[in-house]
């Protein structure tokens, strides 16, 4: 299927590894012009890897999505390099694991800034450019924890729900501008972030890493965690003109982990 992404400009944040990197790679495979950002020098390595694999030039910008000045710089650089912006994927690393009793107010404030306000800032600054596109899409990456809380993740369970509220509201408010706004709710996908969460769980439970992974897999109807590539395939389709009548969707990509009907 032709996703009609050739020549479209996509910005994916927090894309030096994990879900963001896999999504950026898939956009490039589909012929899109891609910009990525992250805080560390790993973003340069990720861009080089994607370029070498796909033959598509990737703009890499070191930036912190919790900082307004960095967000403005990333979007300005993307528009200057590629002449516009069609697709924005708001992604950010997850907040630390922990229970309510483990978590102080400073951690709550940092998590709000990382996972909610980063999306707000990115969308605010990108909107003037997205409004000039004929194929605009915004995708927020959240979590299935918004449907079914995950043990030992009180910050993520709480704050990502606010991103869902933002996404759903914007899908209604921006529809008249022909800007589609959707969210993907990934479940257990084996990334560096999940590696960290598994390590945190072993520290609390005293079980081995293998036992914790087996416990997670056993809860998923498909019997395994997903791969970043499986997530990216869905993300890129949802952002593409092929999905032109899909708006306001909160799509679970979790192997059937969440058993609710809504």
Image (cartoon, rainbow, N blue to C red):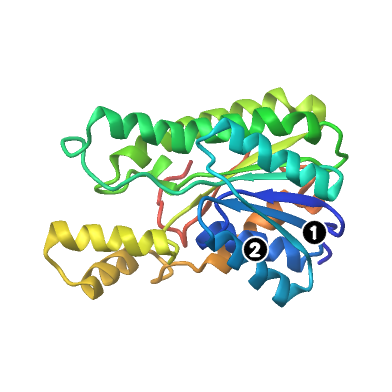
Q: Nearer the viewer, mark 2 or mark 1?
A: 1
The residue nearer to you, when weighing 12 against 227, is 12
Label annotation for residue 42:
none
**Residue 187 seen anywhere in this rendered image of the structure:** yes
- Percent across and percent down for residue 211 are 21, 72
- Percent across and percent down for residue 167 are 59, 33
Q: What is the total number of numbered labels drawn onto the structure image?
A: 2
Q: Residue at x 73, y 27 (%)?
A: 174
Q: Residue at x 60, y 66 (%)?
A: 46
Give the Cα separation between the discs numbered 2 and 1. 14 Å
Q: Quadrant of residue 119?
A: top right
Label annotation for residue 233:
2
**Residue 164 seen anywhere in this rendered image of the structure:** no
User: What residue would you read off at disc 1?
Assistant: 32
* Callout 1 secondary element: loop
- Percent across and percent down for residue 65 are 54, 40
- Percent across and percent down for residue 92 are 50, 46
* Callout 2 secondary element: helix
């Amino acid at each position: 299927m032709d996703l009609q992404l050739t020549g479209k400009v996509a910005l994916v944040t927090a894309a030096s590894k994990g879900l963001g990197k896999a999504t950026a790679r898939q956009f490039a495979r589909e012929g899109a012009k891609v910009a990525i950002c992250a805080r560390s020098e790993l973003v340069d390595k990720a861009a080089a890897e994607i370029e070498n694999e796909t033959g598509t030039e990737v703009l890499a910008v070191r930036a912190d999505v919790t900082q307004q000045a960095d967000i403005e710089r990333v979007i300005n650089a993307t528009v200057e390099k590629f002449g516009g912006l069609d697709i924005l994927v708001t992604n950010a690393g997850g907040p630390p694991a922990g229970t309510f009793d483990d978590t102080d107010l400073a951690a709550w404030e940092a998590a709000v800034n990382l996972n909610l306000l980063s999306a707000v800032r990115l969308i605010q600054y990108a909107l003037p450019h997205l409004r000039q596109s004929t194929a605009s899409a915004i995708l927020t990456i959240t979590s299935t924890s918004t449907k079914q809380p995950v043990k030992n993740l009180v910050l993520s369970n709480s704050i990502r729900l606010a991103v869902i509220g933002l996404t759903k509201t914007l899908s209604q408010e921006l529809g008249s501008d022909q800007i589609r706004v959707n969210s993907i709710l990934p479940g257990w996908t084996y990334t560096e972030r999940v590696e960290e969460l598994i390590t945190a769980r072993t520290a609390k439970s005293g079980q081995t890493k293998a036992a914790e992974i087996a416990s997670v897999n056993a809860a998923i109807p498909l019997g395994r965690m997903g791969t970043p590539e499986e997530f990216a395939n869905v993300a890129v389709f949802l952002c593409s003109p092929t999905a032109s009548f899909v708006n306001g969707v909160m799509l679970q990509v979790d192997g059937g982990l969440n058993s609710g009907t809504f």
